[in-house]
């Protein structure tokens, strides 16, 4: 009887399962809009070769700086490349950055946070000090430093951004682990002789999945924004890799007459970030309801 | 006393008359009728008790009387007449004049019922100056005398304090003082002592009693404690699952309860002079407010229940002088059988 | 309480030190173009050599670092290599513009954000809530640089309603200087043309700065109000007969003030950080613009001086926010 109850506590967050989650998502306008926006971009990235009408890197000086038209939906840029195709391929860059940064930051942060929370004592204190230091600096600055030191490139930017964001995960995971550490089912696991590694991996982390997912989604939005800002400043992926932020920067010198070069790439950023933000908002509300 | 045309003395109208009140709250799975058709009245200078277990709708009833039910909850049916005015049809603006002035309410948790970022003086003067257009000095004077009326020491300096600097008992006294400050006719006290220490409880109850005796105020005293009701009230109403099940003079109801639930409540009090060794309890649990039982709501837990009880919702039956109960088995209970 | 403040302030020098070193490295890693900018086309090799010696550009980096730190301790902020003007004077000139920009944005965020947040809380889950949150989240999703460009395109290029850059119309000129804050100065001097022109030039930068941060304010206000409105004492206020409006604005607001003010305080740092981008796009002559120019030219003295300014500002504002928090809520005592 006792162990059953403890086991149930262990399942406290996984109360309703995937089916219900999807059902609830379909009923919320916020979630639907958010999910749709993100999905559109993902599809764009996945099927880029099929969607883009032209080769994004094909120069055509004869038709440079043409406005939106039937042949070129978004117009052409300063060297005659089709803007729409570049924007479509740019979605790949954006998503790759987001995915990598969020995964790396998430993995590092979760591991460190879980370890610190579980073991407490000296490692915990050390980690918290570290987190405090990292937190007092905005993530943009980390990326800035990394890029300035190592040179502008896709990888350096991703590195910098990951460093900027792991602390978010660490803090949340640590908090949750601290909270869960004293619950009955963890004590039961320890009494049964489970090693700390097993406890962390099999029991703690799945239960922290909820907050991590919320964090990750919200973070994705901000990562895209920050990455765009960095590329705008010229500190991101180098051409010819299509990158939305960089495109806006290039387009800026052709303002105001050739307005489409800055407008459309930026619009894509808004769409993607909005999608992530709405999803994150919805997930956060959903999780709060679930816990009740 | 006014004279009626046929020469008989007219009975004064009650201060508060509630008939058929139904208050609903929409919840995720449907609609809950927290108050499912209750009627009660309070005469002038009378203390009426409202007793029932947690969740039976007592507080919702009180809030409904003051029209403090917030959306999405709604009063969907009934009539409330206070001081000859039809409360439910009043414009909100008129209702605001009545709240705090004609009727005042004190709550269960005084420690969280006072605004923490304003001094007592400010809270008093806001209240008094809202209902009576008096200058600040006058408002302060009224505040001081109200605090004195509730036996709080050194009102002058107390007024400069913040609520968290006071003890629970002092906070509750302050709330009572605010009701006095506006010279209200009706005080609604929702479990005023439940959250206080036992020693303080007696003090507050005595204070309320003194005030009732010394002024023309009426009161509705809500509690789940029959002892409190017994010592303080003139009449009592017993509620269960959103409905009135019994009402009458307090002595009557306590010594001769006519409804099984009321009888269980009263029997449940542990007494040192009783021969029983174990505590009596009412078996079963309170019904699901979303799906109340058919017929009489108490029938699943009632020792006297028969088939009829599940089919037909009983109406109030007079069992004595101003004493009624809503049960099909009142005869059995009163003749002593069944328990 | 004093101990608390002192403890927080003690952290500042350490942070400053870190920032100074960092920016120094950043701006000295690549060779500086600043002196070439200064000399322009007409510089001779001798001029170049002069300047190199003057600014120690031929010395090893560590030596330059110590030399700079030594000068810094004496309070000497150095000179801008690109312009040859003392940094301290430059800063004083550019500062009021940023202050005006940030202050105006702060006011806009405070008023608009709080109103939207209150609407959101009071009409929870109904259309004002959705609308308010929609505005806020959309604002958050827009990259500032893009929003700036869009606003510029729409209001300047298309509609020709608002100026595209600068701080005041060059034909009108700045009002008589008292504080450097053009709006204030115009009012003081009675110069209505300057007043109108300054305001018109401020509108687009302020909107750009504010819109993206509105979300934080709205969200925090909403949370704070939802919390306050559900408290017991709000029921007491209602039972006293006060109107909804009064309850929300007179009693709710003061109770919700602490978190709101903390957010405002935190936003100040972010707003100043935003000046980098916004001032650059709108050619608004403030500290952000000055700093970015210095960084792009690898002009390390103005860059570091700007960095010091921003860090100090950030640190002090945070302490002030905590102090204010304690002062507002009589229950909080350190």
Image (cartoon, coloured by chain):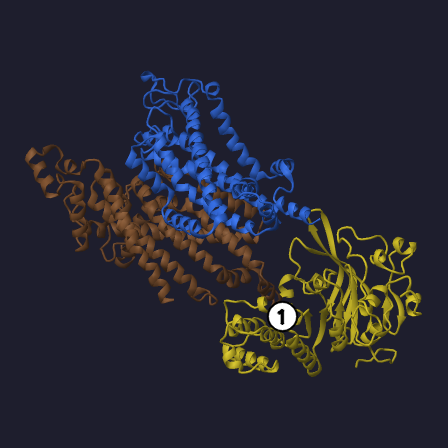
Q: Nearer the viewer, residue B322 or A223?
A: A223
Which chain letter matches label 1? B
- What is the x, y in percent for residue A167? 42, 44
Q: Nearer the viewer, residue A88 or C160?
A: A88
At horizontal 50% and vertical 28% (from top left) the residue drawn is A42
Colour assignment, chain B = yellow
Residue B337: quarter of image:
bottom right
- What is the x, y in percent for residue B182? 61, 75
- Reading the image, the residue beneath label 1 is B100
- Asked if one can make out residue C91 in the rendered structure from this viewpoint, the answer is yes
- What is the x, y in percent for residue C202? 33, 47
- Asked if one can make out residue C162 in the rendered structure from this viewpoint, the answer is no
Q: Nearer the viewer, residue B74 or C322?
A: C322
**In the orientation shown, which residue stands out farthest toward the left?**
C46
Colour assignment, chain C = brown
Q: Which chain is blue?
A: A
Residue B268: quarter of image:
bottom right
How many marks the image carries: the answer is 1
A88 shown above or below A285: above
């Amino acid at each position: 009887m006792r162990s059953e109850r403890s086991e149930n506590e262990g399942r406290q967050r996984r109360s309703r399962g995937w089916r219900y989650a999807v059902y609830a998502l379909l009923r919320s306008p916020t979630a639907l809009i958010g999910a749709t926006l993100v999905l559109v971009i993902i599809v764009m990235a996945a099927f880029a070769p099929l969607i883009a009408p032209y080769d994004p890197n094909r120069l055509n000086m004869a038709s440079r700086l043409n406005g939106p038209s039937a042949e070129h939906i978004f117009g052409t840029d300063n060297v005659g490349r089709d803007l729409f195709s570049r924007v479509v391929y740019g979605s790949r860059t954006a998503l790759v950055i987001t995915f990598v940064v969020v995964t790396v930051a998430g993995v590092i942060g979760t591991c460190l946070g879980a370890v610190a929370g579980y073991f407490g004592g000296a490692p915990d204190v050390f980690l918290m000090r570290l987190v405090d230091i990292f937190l007092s600096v905005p993530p943009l600055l980390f990326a800035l430093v990394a890029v300035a030191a190592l040179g502008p490139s896709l990888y350096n930017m991703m590195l910098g951004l990951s460093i900027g964001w792991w602390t978010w995960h660490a803090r949340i995971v640590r908090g949750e682990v601290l909270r869960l550490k004293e619950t009955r089912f963890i004590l039961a696991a320890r009494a049964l002789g489970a090693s700390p590694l097993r406890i962390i991996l099999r029991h703690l982390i799945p239960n922290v999945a909820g907050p991590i997912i919320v964090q990750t989604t919200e973070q994705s939005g901000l990562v895209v924004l920050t990455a765009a800002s960095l590329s705008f400043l010229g500190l991101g992926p180098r051409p010819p890799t299509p990158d939305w932020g960089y495109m806006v920067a290039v387009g800026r010198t052709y303002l105001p007459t050739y307005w489409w070069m800055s407008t459309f790439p930026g619009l894509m950023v808004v769409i993607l970030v909005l999608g992530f933000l709405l999803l994150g908002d919805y997930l956060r509300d959903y999780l709060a309801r679930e816990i009740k | 006393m006014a004279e009626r045309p046929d020469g008989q003395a007219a009975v004064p109208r009650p201060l508060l008359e509630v008939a058929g009140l139904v208050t609903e709250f929409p919840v995720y799975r449907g609609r809950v009728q927290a108050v499912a058709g209750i009627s009660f009245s309070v005469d002038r200078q009378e203390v009426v008790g409202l007793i029932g277990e947690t969740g039976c709708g007592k507080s919702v009833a009180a809030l409904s009387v003051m029209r403090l039910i917030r959306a999405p909850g709604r009063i969907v049916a009934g009539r409330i007449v206070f001081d000859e005015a039809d409360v439910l049809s009043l414009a909100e603006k008129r209702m605001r004049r009545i709240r705090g002035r004609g009727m005042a309410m004190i709550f269960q948790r005084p420690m969280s019922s006072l605004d923490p970022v304003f001094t007592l003086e400010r809270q008093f003067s806001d209240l008094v100056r809202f209902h009576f257009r008096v200058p600040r000095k006058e408002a302060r004077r009224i505040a001081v005398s109200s605090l004195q009326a509730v036996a709080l020491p050194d009102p002058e300096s107390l007024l400069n304090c913040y609520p968290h600097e006071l003890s629970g008992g002092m906070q509750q006294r302050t709330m009572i003082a605010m009701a006095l400050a506006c010279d209200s006719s009706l005080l609604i006290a929702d479990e005023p002592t439940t959250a206080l220490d036992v020693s303080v409880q007696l003090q507050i109850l005595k204070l309320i009693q003194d005030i009732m005796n010394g002024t023309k105020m009426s009161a509705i005293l809500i509690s789940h404690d029959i002892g409190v009701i017994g010592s303080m009230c003139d009449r009592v109403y017993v509620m269960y699952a959103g409905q009135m099940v019994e009402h009458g003079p307090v002595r009557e109801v306590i010594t001769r309860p006519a409804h099984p639930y009321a009888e269980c409540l009263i029997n449940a009090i542990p007494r040192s002079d009783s021969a029983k060794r174990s505590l009596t309890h009412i078996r079963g649990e309170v019904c699901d407010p979303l799906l109340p039982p058919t017929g009489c709501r108490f029938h699943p837990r009632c020792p006297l229940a028969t088939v009829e009880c599940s089919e037909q919702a009983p109406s109030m039956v007079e069992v004595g002088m101003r004493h009624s109960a809503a049960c099909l088995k009142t005869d059995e209970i009163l003749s002593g059988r069944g328990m | 309480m004093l101990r608390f403040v002192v403890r927080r302030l003690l952290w500042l020098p350490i942070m400053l030190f870190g920032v100074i070193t960092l920016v120094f490295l950043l701006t000295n890693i690549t060779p500086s173009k600043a002196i070439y900018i200064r000399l322009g086309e007409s510089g001779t090799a001798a001029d170049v050599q002069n300047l190199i010696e003057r600014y120690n550009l031929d010395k090893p980096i560590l030596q330059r670092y110590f030399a700079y730190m030594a000068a810094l301790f004496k309070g000497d902020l150095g000179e801008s290599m690109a312009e040859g003007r003392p940094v301290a004077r430059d800063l004083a000139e550019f500062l009021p513009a940023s202050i005006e920009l940030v202050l105006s944005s702060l006011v806009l965020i405070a008023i608009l954000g709080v109103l939207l947040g209150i609407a959101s809380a009071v009409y929870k889950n109904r259309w004002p809530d959705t609308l308010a949150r929609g505005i806020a989240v959309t604002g958050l999703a827009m990259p500032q640089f893009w929003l700036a460009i869009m606003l510029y395109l729409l209001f300047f290029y298309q509609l020709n309603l608002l100026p595209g850059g600068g701080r005041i119309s060059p034909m009108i000129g700045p009002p008589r200087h008292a504080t450097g804050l053009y709006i204030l100065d115009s009012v003081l001097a009675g110069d209505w043309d300057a007043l109108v022109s300054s305001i018109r030039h401020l509108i687009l930068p302020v909107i750009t700065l504010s819109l993206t941060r509105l979300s934080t304010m709205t969200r925090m206000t909403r949370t704070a109000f939802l919390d306050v409105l559900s408290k017991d004492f709000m029921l007491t206020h209602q039972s006293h007969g006060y109107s909804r409006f009064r309850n929300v604005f007179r009693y709710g607001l003061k109770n919700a003030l602490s978190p709101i003010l903390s957010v405002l305080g935190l936003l100040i740092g972010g707003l100043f950080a935003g000046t980098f981008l916004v001032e650059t796009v709108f050619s608004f002559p403030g500290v952000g613009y000055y700093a970015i120019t210095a960084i792009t030219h690898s002009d390390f003295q103005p860059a570091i001086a700007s960095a010091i300014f921003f860090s100090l500002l950030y640190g002090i504002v945070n302490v002030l926010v905590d102090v204010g928090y304690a002062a507002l809520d009589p229950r909080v005592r350190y």
